[in-house]
Amino acid sequence: MLAAMPPTPSPAPTPAPGAPRVRERGDACPGALRLHSADDGHLARLRLPAGRLTARQVEVLAHAAEALGDGRISVTSRGNAELRGLADGCGAELAALLAEAGLLPSPTHERVRNIVASPAAGLDGLGHADVQLWARELDGLLCAAPWAAALSGRFLFVLDDGRGDVTGLGGDVTLVAVAPDAALLRLGDRAVRVAAADAPRAALAAARAFLTAAREAGTGAWRVRELPEGHEADVRGALTAAGIAAEPVREPGQEPVRGPVREPVRESVREPVRDPAREPAPESVPSHAAPPAPGPLGPRSLHVLAPLGRLTAAQLRALLPADEVRLTPWRGAVAAGADPGRLPALEAYGLITRPDSPWAGVSACTGRPGCAKSLADVRADAVPGRPGLPVHYSGCERRCGHPHGDWVDVLAVPGGGYLVDGVPSSRTTLTAAVATARTTR
């Protein structure tokens, strides 16, 4: 039987000369088997590639929340699920429930299955490819590769179907469908074009290139952006080694990338003269687009948001019947194959079903009493937001779970007050302060 495991720091590698360490400890990111101790009990984080849950898995997750936790499911900014308030000694029972439902396909890889994909892919007729299928293939490849277990629990794959809804979520490896038969693979500030059929394998090869670069740098990097200068991942070399054809491209504003394969740099070899005729033209990639609004999603699906990012077990079950449920990085859920006519009934459950709801886009960290670092009960203090811009309430300067892109920052400070994008506010003036905030984030 699977059992909960305590954090096991990995050995610290020796940094390359001149490269400062960015991490001094191993990755202790919580998972489904590695529980985190909090003030309100233990916490389990379940990685759900593309946020996908079958109807059976929805039932199991709701049951686990009620029987072992506080009865709620937190939806993370990566579309994963967290169970809180777990009692001591429940790790083995939780692991058995999840494994039986197919939510733990690989105990050794369960924390590295961080895959975000466009939640509406294949449902509303938009986009160039059903990246939900890419996500399933990539998940299988990840779990089958022993070396992939060395990735950090924070390393993120982002798969965008071309609409641009998830491209801005800070992926380490990003795949964007740019045509029905082609994808852009991006890692760091370099990009290559690959065949759509090769996209999942290409993403895995890019992750391996990152691990190689991180090991050689020896600085403890968990994310691509943490690699020191001079230790960029050799993505095209990794693709060539994997037998994947790749065409160099550049995005608007990016320096040209020359040649089909990156060659080792030798001091005795002179840099070739730039030939504009051989340089790839800029690739047209959609800019970051707004997420789908709550409400109908195509003819047979719907999208709802969880109030302050948390679903009760009853609210999660209310999404059924559906072909599947996809938790989203906007702390909501897409019910694929569900009649949009059910939206009024879901609103009666307390779910956010309309884009004009003042609670749409409002999120909060755990806050008191669940987090010892929090200075306030931010969930109790939260007030409705303003249209068009996310609002996030944080109990401390860590700002756990904040959105990507532009958002109104509401930060608890000592003494019971808040800073709203840096401007002091009391609890009684929060509504006005949030409504008039001029964020620069």
Image: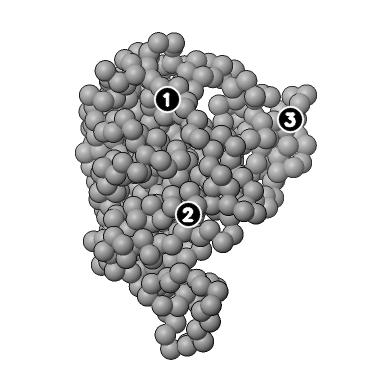
Dot 1 surroundings within 10 Å: few (below 14), some, or many (20 or more)? many
Please name the residue that numbered disc 1 is placed on.
Answer: 34
> Which secondary structure, mark 1?
loop
Residue projecting furthest to the front:
268
Dot 3 surroundings within 10 Å: few (below 14), some, or many (20 or more)? some
Q: Nearer the viewer, mark 1 or mark 3?
A: 1
- Whichever of labels 1 and 2 marks the residue nearer the N terminus, that label is 1
- Please give the label number shown on residue 213: 2
Residue at x 50% of width, y 71% of height: 265
Query: Quick check: 375 above or below 175?
Result: above
The amino acid sitting under disc 1 is Arg
Residue at x 72% of width, y 32% of height: 418
The residue lying toward the viewer, choosing from 423 and 152, is: 152
The amino acid sitting under disc 2 is Ala
Query: Quick check: 268 above or below 335?
Result: below
Q: Which colour scheme appears in the figure?
A: one colour
